[in-house]
Image (cartoon, rainbow, N blue to C red):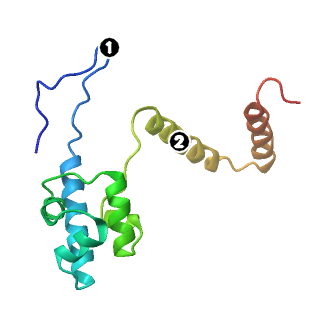
Amino acid sequence: MSRSSNARVAPGRKRREPDPHSDTVREHVARCLRSLREKRGWAAAELAAKTGLSPAVLHSYESGLRPIGAGTLYELAAALETPIADFFDGLPPTAPSGEAKELLDSGEDLVELLLRIKDPVLLLRLSAFVRHLARGPNAR
């Protein structure tokens, strides 16, 4: 399902672009939900009864037609006696973006450069210097 492109947005707020990965995550979680239920030998009606969901709503979750909210996912995990993380097993790890990625890249570059320095005295001095900088301007 896609959101309507002419949905209202509150004044002063920007329209959030849809995440291209959200459908694949929703489908993955849906497959995991069905698989976890089936591993326990439960019918859909049984899980629905344990969670207070209607069988139709549970079916829409298991089919990936409807996104599962965080609270509902928590209830489903509790009913299935499984950690919530099990619903996300097998998904690729999330990647840092923007400033975080630049910071990680520059940190990796710095480590690579430091590893090239063979003089132990220089490495100790650089280490002391970096510690001094990290303490901030008011540190002694």
x, y percent for residue 27: 18, 58
Left or right, 129 with respect to 22, comes to right
Q: Nearer the viewer, residue 16 or 105?
A: 16
Q: Is residue 93 above or below residue 132?
A: below
Q: Residue furthest right?
A: 140
Residue at screen point 36% across, 63% down = 75
For the residue labelled by badge 2, is the local secondary structure a helix, a strand or a loop? helix
- Mark 2 crowd level (few <14, some 14–19, many ≥20, 10 Å Cα): few
Residue, disc 2:
109
Q: Is residue 85 above or below residue 6?
A: below
Residue at screen point 18% across, 22% down = 8
Residue at screen point 59% across, 46% down = 111
- Give, as a three-letter code, the residue at label 1: Gly
Q: Quadrant of residue 131?
A: top right
Q: Nearer the viewer, residue 47 or 69?
A: 47
Q: Nearer the viewer, residue 89 or 123?
A: 89
Left or right, 95 with respect to 134, comes to left
Q: Nearer the viewer, residue 109 or 6?
A: 6
Q: CA distance from mark 1 to mark 2?
A: 40 Å
* Disc nearer the start of the sequence (1/2): 1
Residue at screen point 20% across, 67% down = 31
Say which mark, if any, is on residue 75: none
For the residue labelled by badge 1, is the local secondary structure a helix, a strand or a loop? loop
Q: Residue furthest top?
A: 12
Residue, disc 1:
12
- Mark 1 crowd level (few <14, some 14–19, many ≥20, 10 Å Cα): few
